[in-house]
Image (cartoon, rainbow, N blue to C red):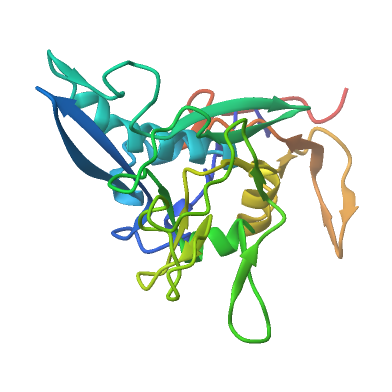
Amino acid sequence: MGLASISLLDSHANIRKLVPKTRSVMTMTWAKVKQGRRAGYTSNVTLNDLEDMASVTDGEHLMRAIVEGLEKEKLESAEPGALFTTLDGKQNLYATFQWIPHGKDVDLLIDNSKTYLNNLFSPWVGIDLEFALKMEWIKKKFQGGTYVLGPNLLREVHSRTFNTDPQVLGVLVNAKREPVLWQVNDRQQALLSGRCNWRFINLNTAFRNIRGDPHRTLYIYSNVASSTIVGYQIVDLLREVQYKKREGKGSTHFEQDIFASIFESL
């Protein structure tokens, strides 16, 4: 007997194990101005909110799905006469997400170079602390239980100077009312201020370190060829294929499995 077709299960990334599915994995604040009045809003994304979980095959796709979820509420609230910028249109009332090519990878940049900041409203982005620790955006010190920035999150100064007035920095002040650019709050979120840019690097590597290498090996067995030794067994292994392309759509199925008779000797 010989194998004429195969089907291969595609085990897409199980991201539900990153954090509890109902907890906000990322949060951002933003504002809208209509008829001269400004109102602040908060957008949250949980893993339950992501519509196509199977499309997440690596760290970049995961973050793209999260960012799309964060911006969805803001975009859906657009209406005639409403602005997401200051009245002069020069500053944004939200943080801007950009995707920056970096060799074979892509970095996620939170660009705050045009973000509006004052003592009444300062947009910020929050990340679930457990998620941030797993992606190595935040690290916990062994002594004192304090947190520091991890190797995969870079703070970048934009052209605007840092303002050290705690009244201007709004929510991001510590217990002593001292200005901070980021902090971990009581709700176990890492909050990133709009006072500088934030670059998330090594998205795919960090994600792969969490869930393991997605590459798998496909073994094709048939008695067409001579038996061979694999490990401690003698098996009819026809070929070994490194399966690297992962569509993340459940399974790759070529056709119904068919086993057909063939000549075993010529």
| Residue located 77% across and 37% down the image | 242
Residue at far left of view: 35
The image shows residue 107, relative to residue 213, as above or below, that is: above
Query: Does residue 131 lie above or below 1 as drawn?
Result: below
Camera-side residue: 27 or 184?
A: 184
* Quarter that holds the C terminus: top right
Where is residue 36 drawn, in percent x and y? 13, 25
Q: Quadrant of residue 95?
A: top left
Residue 167 position within the rendered picture, expressed as x and y whole percent measured from the top left: 37, 56
Residue nearest the viewer, comparing 81 with 254: 81
Instruction: Give the residue displayed 80% in from the left and 43% down from the top.
Output: 237
Quarter of the image for residue 224 reads top right
**Residue 58 visible in image:** no
Residue furthest bottom in the image: 143
Residue shown at the point (39%, 24%) measured from the top left = 91
Left or right of 2? Residue 12 is left
Residue 9 location in percent, x, y?
A: 54, 41
The quarter in which the N terminus is drawn is top right
Q: Residue at x 28, y 59 (%)?
A: 22
Q: Is residue 205 left or right of residue 181?
A: right
